[in-house]
Image: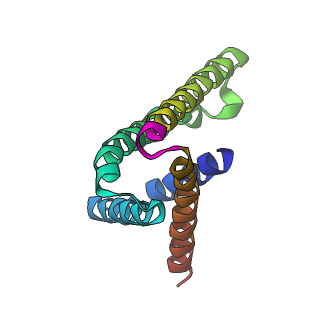
Amino acid sequence: MKKLITLMVVLFSIVSIAQPSKEKIEKVKALKVAYITKELSLTSAEAEKFWPVYNAYDEKQFELRHNKMRTIMKKYKDSGLDNLNDKEAATILSEMESIDEELLNLRKKFVKDAKEIIGAKKVLQLKKAEEEFTRTLFKQYKGKDRK
């Protein structure tokens, strides 16, 4: 789980730095859907139930990481870490911990819901497929960066 979170943070950092167009983001999402569907061998009935749950989870996760966490990070980037007093730093840490808790609870709820739709084995396969997709995407991005 920590590896997935780290990889997703790196991926979202890259995405935010590169400022990709909406078309590129949609293309990556479509590739991810196709990759996961293939890796999990989802039936049409499973896919019909699974994707709305997954997409809702993915959007909420992105919103927490990208919007809320970015807002918090901006607080100390604007003033600089050296200019923060202990009370301000503690407040920022508390806010970050709260978001981390929300992310954990969101993941737990998603796993529970997904198990009911696709079963525990496919949920584990999903975790592996997400990691592989992110790794592949990151490698492709690094390869383009070097050219």
In the image, is residue 22 part of the stretch drawn in magenta?
no
> x%, y% of residue 30?
32, 63
- Residue at the location (57% across, 22% down)? 98
Asked if one can make out residue 24 in the rendered structure from this viewpoint, the answer is: yes
In the image, is residue 115 part of the stretch drawn in magenta?
yes
> x%, y% of residue 101?
58, 26
Where are the magenta residues, as a range? 114-119
Q: Main secondary structure of the magenta part?
A: helix
114 vs 1, left or right, is left
Which residue is at the front of the view, 90 or 63?
A: 63
37 vs 85, left or right, is left
Q: Residue furthest top?
A: 87
7 vs 16, left or right, is right
Q: Quadrant of residue 87?
A: top right
- Residue at the location (67% across, 28% down)? 83
Instruction: Determine whether 39 is above or below 145 in the image.
Output: above
Image quadrant in which the N terminus is located: top right
> x%, y% of residue 65?
49, 39
> x%, y% of residue 53?
36, 40
Which residue is at the front of the view, 109 or 100?
A: 109
Q: Residue furthest bottom?
A: 147
- Residue at the location (50% across, 79% down)? 144
Count of numbered circles on the image = 0
Which residue is at the front of the view, 41 or 33?
A: 41
Q: Quadrant of residue 135?
A: bottom right
Asked if one can make out residue 20 in the rendered structure from this viewpoint, the answer is: no
